[in-house]
Amino acid sequence: MSLDSGPSGPREPVGGDLVRRHALATRLWHWTNAITILVMLMSGLMILNAHPRLYWGHYGSDHDAAWLVLADMDDIAFPGWMTIPTDYSLADARLWHFAFAWVLVLAFTAYLIWGLVRGHIARRLHITRIEWSPRHILHDIVEHAKLKFPTGAAALDYNVLQKLAYGGVLFVLIPALIASGLAMSPALDAAWPWLVDLFGGRQSARSVHFIAAMALVLFFLVHMAMVLLAGPVNEVRSMLTGWYRLPRDKGEAP
């Protein structure tokens, strides 16, 4: 962060200061991940159009009891504007999905290694004992409900709700997507049968894959709402350039 120095060194950042917020690796992974998951989601919806029902266990077909029916077998669950490709093609959808799955895995692995080795993830996502207290979590929920966002130097740190959300994406949702996707591969079923058993069957892995994908969509919607409410220009600029202007208190002079 570029701040004026005083007699005892750089001063504490305050509202209105322009500071470095996001490392280059974080920004690269953020945008790579956003594009990759969008393509995988849209191609995944086309794949789901081929059989718009979900089951638990090893097997699932037209005559089995599905826990989720998205459309009748003769209907299309998702319209062309939501899918890749726009016209029905299971083969092309699989090509798109599997190609970008490699991008997801490689980018995620690289970011995770970088973040753990450099201590970035521990610094940004570590939840302290105080933050785990129900009173603290409830306070953050109330503050979000009132649309009261931190200002000054406090805006540089993630609150406990952000830490839980980002940690859930990094260590639960994306790993669940990758593992369940691998469990649906016939080749890996033969090589690693324990992976299929871990999910309780290929159809269970397919269901987990869908649930994790929908959870990511929910995360994206909440994330975008928070960006819009907190100031989209400042938030997007920080993820493009790394520079972020600390919000001022309401009564603070510009």
Image (cartoon, rainbow, N blue to C red):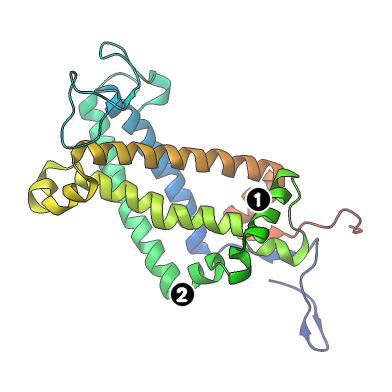
**Nearest the eye: 251 or 210:** 210
Q: Determine whether 150 is above or below 75 in the image.
A: below
Look at the numbered disc 1 and give the secondary structure of its residue: helix
Left or right: residue 177 versus residue 250 is left
**Nearest the eye: 155 or 39:** 155
The x and y percentages for residue 73 are: 25, 14
Quadrant that contains the N terminus: bottom right
The x and y percentages for residue 169 are: 45, 52
Left or right: residue 152 versus residue 167 is right
Label 2 CA crowd tier, 10 Å (few <14, some 14–19, many 20+): few
**Nearest the eye: 74 or 232:** 74
The x and y percentages for residue 208 are: 32, 41
Question: In the rendering, which numbered label is found on residue 235?
Answer: 1
**Nearest the eye: 40 or 172:** 172
Q: Residue furthest bottom?
A: 7
- The residue beneath circle 2 is 118
Count of numbered circles in the view: 2
x 70%, y 61%: residue = 155
Q: Quadrant of residue 131?
A: bottom right
x 72%, y 72%: residue = 2
What's under tag 2, amino acid-wise?
A: Arg
x 46%, y 45%: residue = 34
What's under tag 1, amino acid-wise?
A: Glu
Label 1 CA crowd tier, 10 Å (few <14, some 14–19, many 20+): some
Q: Residue furthest top?
A: 74
Left or right: residue 126 versus residue 105 is right
- What separation in Å lies between label 2 and label 1 (alpha carbons)? 24 Å
The x and y percentages for residue 52 are: 29, 23
Left or right: residue 80 versus residue 226 is left
Look at the numbered disc 2 and give the secondary structure of its residue: loop
Q: Quadrant of residue 36?
A: top left
Q: Which comes sooner in the sequence, label 2 or label 1?
A: 2
